[in-house]
Image (cartoon, rainbow, N blue to C red):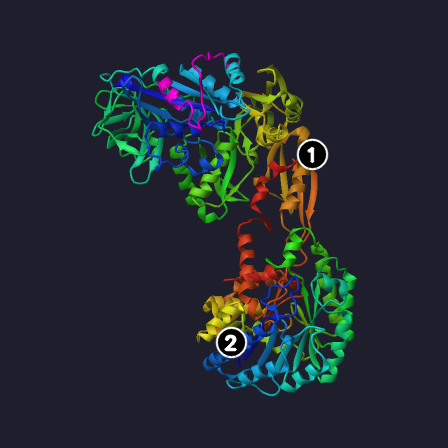
Amino acid sequence: MQDRIRNFCIIAHIDHGKSTLADRLIEFTGTMSERDMQEQVLDNMDLERERGITIKLQAVRLVYHAKDGEEYTLNLIDTPGHVDFSYEVSRSLAACEGALLVVDAVQGIEAQTLANVYLALDSNLTIIPVINKIDLSSADPERVLREIEEVIGLPTDNAILCSAKEGVGIAEILEAIVREIPPPQGDIDAPLQALIFDSHYDSYRGVISYVRVVNGSIQRGQKIRMIATAREYEVDDVGVFTPPRLPVPALTPGMVGYCIAGIKNVKDTRVGDTITGAANPAPRALPGYRKITPMVFCGLYPSENNQYEELRDALDKLKLNDSSLIYEPETSDALGFGFRCGFLGLLHMEVIQERLEREYELDLVTTAPNTLYRVLTTSNEELFIDNPAHLPPSNKIEMMYEPYVKASIIVPEEYIGTMMELCQERRGTFKNMEYLDTTRVVITYELPLSEILYDYFDQLKSRSRGYASLDYELIGYREADLVKLDVLLNGEPVDALSCIVHADRAQQKGRGLTEKLRKIIPRQMFDIPIQAAVGAKIIARETVKAMRKDVLAKCYGGDITRKRKLLEKQKEGKKRMKQVGNVEIPQEAFMAILKVDE
Amino acid sequence: MSRRGLYIHVPLCRGKCLYCDFYSLAIDDTRVAQYMEALLKEIGIKGAMWGGPIDTIYFGGGTPSCLSVDKVAAILKECGRFFTWERACEVTFELNPGTTDGRYLKELHALGVTRVSVGLQTKEPHHLARLGRSHTGDDFFRLMENLRVAGFCNYSVDAMYGLPRQTLYEHLDTLRTIVAAGAPHVSVYALQVEPFTPLADLVAQGEVALPTDDLVADMMLAGGEYLEAQGFLHYEFSNFARANCQSQHNIIYWHNEEYIGLGPSAASYIGGRRSVNVPDITQYALSLNAGRLPVQTCELLTGEKAMSETIILGLRLLDEGVNRGRFSRRFGRDCVEVYSSVMAKLVGQGLLEVTEEAVRLTARAFPLANQILIKFLS
């Protein structure tokens, strides 16, 4: 039966139609009746459907009756398309033998497609090119096929033209999966080796591990051992995703499914770890994943202090499904008790914030994101700084280093100038430019990561009218002339407003920031000076003038309830603000630095 | 001794002002008849429940002067079947310049109306027109003359500031005109852009530009200074009076005492319960014709909530403040004790004054009163 299993994933840029194609495959194989299909079955997080992105990888088992008369089990393992989630991509690739490379017939190859294809090629996956959206009048499949051959160097004679929306080419894709992708290798009689490629916490059943069995088998009642943690458990249940969980007697080599083993703590099932049998353990673990370090940090604080415990519980739960999220408690004079959290990138940060607010109903104050700085002190100590407030005083700093990325931007040639201008503004170093075809180019720049955090992606998109796509990878630390920009309100420094900026930009950023804060901070009962300082030197100043009138004029018999409600609303609004000394600061002020116009 | 007021809402107007969010409809004979029939029924029901002595009566609107004198007489007569009031009781009647003649006013006076509240707002005709009001400056002077002839010596004039494109000078000039006409009571309000009014739409569309917050603050402060210099007592946030000319009916509200409201959208506060009538004349009439009170919302205000409202309303009385004795008699506790920490802090900041008799806002605190009142919310 192992030779009738195919494990594959879909690689696609955002909007190139991956989720729609997945839906069609599920429909075509009759895995779910049309009635049960919610649009885009794989993206079952609300946030994913709304934003049209895939965040968490998911798995679905398709049962397909092929033209050769045999019945095949096709396991589709979803991959996120966004650059922030390349870690998740490498996880899904490790569980597959093949990949569908979906490219939009109008837009062609984009930066993220490239990055993910190279990951797949590195993992020795069989790749089937699929040109989607051929139903569109502006589709140019010939050009896109040429791009795939020339840019990636992938033969396209096995490529399939399809329209997931219209259901064209779906049968051909399924046949190609069976024909081209090799069945999984593996020995059922060897000691158990199953790769945990994801996990999920269920409040009734505990941790549910998503596994791909490589050797041996796993069944109910079996004693298993996690190789990395050496902890042992008894299996309660194993099964497959139809997509709803369906128990099966055993998972054997090549099978993708779930394993429930009474594990209460998600930390005990590390994604990337290998499950083996307690009785007959495998001598070594399967190759894991490229370990990735979060490079984007921000402070997350409950807007009301009594929600601190809830925030911690929520982070713990999210961590169960997202091992890339890291956090540790921190305190701020301005914001009280909270967490410094590390993310893979900006989108990852936004997704986590939104999930905390939506799924856990938390009201959060977020500080502006920063990267991880490396500091060499005068006493020759090496520090990694993830919070600007913790930067040592400048006379204790020998040298500072910040992370750099290599950014690849794919853009139509008429936007070359604007893109280069943007990269120059962001302290970028030009590296290379290559034509993909006659009209599109890949521009390569080296940029400080911190410059990408502040409004870079939005600028990239708006200055190219949405045509540019971006991918980046970290290339290490470089020496940089950086300073800490502090903000004082009413003479008091507010730690949560500090940021690290390039020395040449300090003046400009300081002016922009104080001006922005003047607009954000509401008038209060006294004048509030806003100052930006580098060390002891004030470099910019603005004042929020005292409020002069705040009176509800009319209040007679018929108005009393309504006027009281107005006052209650006003009080509620104040409660949402953070009190620092005598000054009330709205939550958005802590993100103001991001909106300082260049 | 706690007092009780009677409020009668007349939801009819000749036209609707652009800023108005009170319940009112264009006047026509059918509506007047529908209103009168239902109102008399409501007086019957509420009179049976809460009849007895009352201390003030107030006809508000809308435009009460849209009603003919015999309708007003019928309302007072029906009230008299259940409620009793002294001859000297304050009976206030709201009217707009240009809606009444000398004879109407004489007849009102003869019916026992003792006080008139005039909706002037501003003397500048172009501002009046922009607000959708139909009277002129001359209408105002004629009205003042007619009031004197009819024998009214207690009357109030409303002025409004913060109007689109209004200058500080124009506002002060309106106040000067009111004072020169001899009004013993002036109410001065900032224009509020209430949601769902035509004015709110105009502002949202950018058709109407409102003055800056600073100009509005200047108007409030300069207007108050002017009236105080003229010998008026700034006795409530928006109200100024010569000696003994304060509005007794409104003081009942600010003392958080009881009142019975009649007519669509009118509010009653009695027995610790505040109920508000439906703001719709048809539903109002349907309920009453079926023998039911036309209540839309009702809330019970007890304990902390009632104490909090008593403070929030009482602090509006800038001169009198919250009377500690009256508060203790009502709630069995001294308000300074109930709100000890809040009050101590405000006193320390020079925003509140606590004496043996009363707790009041300081002159400095008044312009930012909301910032202080919210601290007393329960």
Q: Please say if A396 is above or below A356.
A: above
Q: Nearer the viewer, residue A152 or A300?
A: A152
Q: Amino acid at mark 1?
A: Gln
Q: Amino acid at mark 2?
A: Ala
Is disc 1 surrounded by few (<14), some (14 to 19) or many (20+) residues within 10 Å? some
Can I make out residue A536 in this image?
no
At x 48%, y 39%, the residue is A353
- Residue range in magenta is A151-177
Can I make out residue B278 in this image?
yes
Local secondary structure at mark 1: helix
Q: Is residue B263 left or right of residue A279?
A: right
Local secondary structure at mark 2: helix
Q: Quadrant of residue B356?
A: bottom right
Label 2 sits on residue: B38
From the image, state whether disc 2 or disc 1 is nearer to you: 2
Is disc 2 surrounded by few (<14), some (14 to 19) or many (20+) residues within 10 Å? many
Label 1 sits on residue: A507
Spot occupied by residue B149 in the image (x, y as percentages of width and height):
74, 84
Q: Nearer the viewer, residue A382 or A468?
A: A468
The chain to which mark 1 is attached is A
Q: CA distance from mark 2 to mark 1?
A: 71 Å
Question: Residue A461 lies in magenta, yes or no?
Answer: no
Q: Is residue A148 left or right of residue B180?
A: left
Marker disc for residue B95: none
Q: Please say if A484 is above or below A411.
A: below
